[in-house]
Amino acid sequence: MTEQRSYRFRHAILRRPSPSVIDGLRAVDCGDPDFAEFERQHADYAAALTEAGLTVTLLDPLDEFPDSVFVEDPALCIDAAAIVLRPGAPSRFGEAAEIAPALADHYETVHTLGQGLLDGGDVLLCDTEVLVGMSGRTDQAGFDSLAALLGDYGYLARQVEVPPSVLHFKSDCGLLDSETVLSTSRLAASGCFEDFRVLACPAGEEQAANLIRVNDVVIMRSGFPRTAELLSTAGYELRLVDSSEAARVDGGLSCMSLRCP
Ligand code: CIR
């Protein structure tokens, strides 16, 4: 049964931010996150997932890994198994071993990516296809290793381009339903979504593109009124969350949770 498996979930794994998140990686420095506000926003994000019908596991913060709140990058959760990945930023590589026990609590089968580098932020899981962005964090060996693993679960992996200025593939897109994505124009220009219905993220609101569909709700970042209007008009039920502090260290919405069936 593959229908809707890309957005039907029952559980999510999150990690609380550590005060060290103020040292998180970022491409452009617009000032450190405010830690207290980060905690508030993270709690509201967890509440949004709960309202969408998920039970939420909150893992303890990890001081030694400033970016470890972004749990999506060191792991991938599919219906029948979880995969411990090999994050592409050297300071984040150790997060993989830290997330593994939480995966083992939820899955009988936990694989480990055998080789290469691959961040979960580059992986768009659709119902039967998996799009993998070849960003600065993901390499060919990582893709090959993931494609082989996912093939055993009925997924076909496809490599796609990521614009040079964009951190991860999903920084610029989000799945809205089995056939539809919201995408920035710069990402869609590569033709990677030819088989999808594409809603174009309004120019100037590119930071809204990294949304998540969770059961019947689309969780998106507040502060992007034209995108919210576009999605509401298209019939999607929205839950807005403020993630301004995560954005200061290049984090979006998808990266703060692992969503599991
Ligand atoms: C990093 O650069 O790795 C973190 N500061 C942000 C990671 C965001 N992850 C994601 O979009 N999947």
Image (cartoon, rainbow, N blue to C red):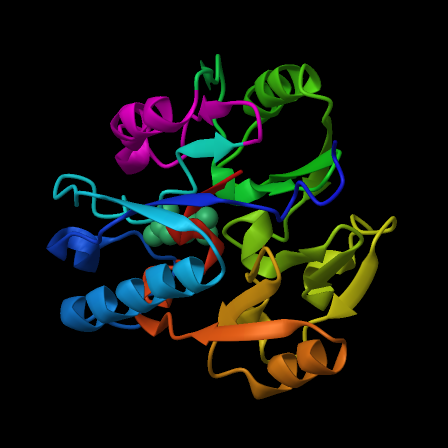
Can residue 58 be seen in this snapshot? yes
Q: In front here: 234 or 21?
A: 234
Rendered location of residue 79, percent (x, y): 58, 30
Q: Residue furthest right?
A: 195
31 to the left or right of 71: left
Quadrant housing residue 158: top right
8 to the left or right of 43: right
Q: In front here: 7 or 61?
A: 7
Looking at the rendered image, the quarter that the N terminus falls into is top right
Residue at screen point 87% across, 51% down: 194
Q: Vertically, is 232 above or below 22?
A: below
* Number of dots carrying numbers: 0
Confirm whether the magenta stretch covers residue 83: yes
Rendered location of residue 21, percent (x, y): 20, 55
Confirm whether the magenta stretch covers residue 141: no
Residue at screen point 64% across, 86% down: 226
Residue at screen point 62% across, 73% down: 237
Quadrant housing residue 149: top right
Residue at screen point 70% across, 42% down: 126
57 to the left or right of 163: left
Can residue 165 be seen in this snapshot? no
41 to the left or right of 201: left
Rendered location of residue 74, percent (x, y): 39, 34
Rendered location of residue 75, percent (x, y): 43, 32
Quadrant housing residue 198: bottom right
Q: Vertically, is 40 above or below 83?
A: below
Chain part drawn in magenta: 78-107
